[in-house]
Image (cartoon, grey):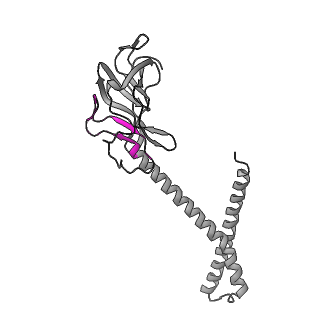
Amino acid sequence: MIPGAGGAAAAGFLLMVLAAFIGALLLLWWGWRLWNERRGTPRPPLRLWQWGLAIVLSVLPISTALSLAQWALHDFMRERKMAQQDRLKHFTLRQALPWGEITLPAGSHAQRELLEGDERLRGDASDLRSLTDIRFAQAVTWGEVSVNAMSLSGRQLLLELDRPHRFAAPAQAQDCPAGFTAQFNALKEPVLLADVPYPVYEARPLNMADWVFDSCYQTQPIAVRYWRDGELVWAKAPDYGYEE
């Protein structure tokens, strides 16, 4: 916890309680004067010092109400912006899209990074330069490898295998069952698109010449979210028949 944060929060809460109390008293007082006036028994006009006191006492309730309204508006705008960003980050391909040596099927669920201050996306599902994860609508074939999902992170490519495959690694060949994750390393230095607040690398179209197999292992399926009925949900992975 930040030193003094608890005390500041307590002081802010007490100020809001005091502002609410003073505001309620002022409203009751003005309401009482108005009620008497409507009854035909108006109260004596306020003196100058009474006007001054009422104005001074109203400063705290009014300023507190304005601050609360400003905070509420700020939270609303921030949540709205986050929702818009989520709409751009998580999308579903409406039509098949060639991407290097594979074709991304229509209906595939994808995720990408948003670049700071970049308005290029605006719902454009064909711009995959900052793609990070994708779960295919049906298995795609890359060379002789059948894949259900893919994850990119600059120098590393992860493929979720749809069928067993035997890879020839530099050290020794490796048999990888269906559902295992095959890891590849980039042969070319990735292009940095942004570095705010962490590096975002360009997701180049998938070509065998750019990657070398490293290893495969059993792990959780590649997690991808997508929009369904206005809600972000997790795309379901196939049942590979082994325990997680």
In this rendering, would 133 be left or right of 28? left
How many numbered marks appear? 0
Residue 107 in sight in this render? yes
Position in image of residue 217 (x %, y %):
46, 18
**As rendered, which of 166 and 85 lies closer to the eye?**
166
Where residue 236 sits, quadrant-wise, is top left
What residue is shown at x 32% (from left), y 20% (from top)?
Answer: 145
Q: Horizontal placement of 225 versus 50: left or right?
A: left
Q: Quadrant of residue 152?
A: top left
Q: Residue at x 30, y 36 (%)?
A: 107
Residue at (64, 79) in percent of width and height: 30
Q: Tell me where residue 67 appears, x and y as whole percent.
A: 60, 64
Q: Which residues are magenta?
A: 87-115
| Residue 150 x %, y % | 38, 29
Q: Can you say whether 104 is above or below 120 in the image?
A: above
Residue positioned 68% across, 79% down in the render: 54
Reply above or below: 76 against 63: above
Magenta run includes residue 89:
yes
Q: Is 85 rendered above or below residue 43? A: above
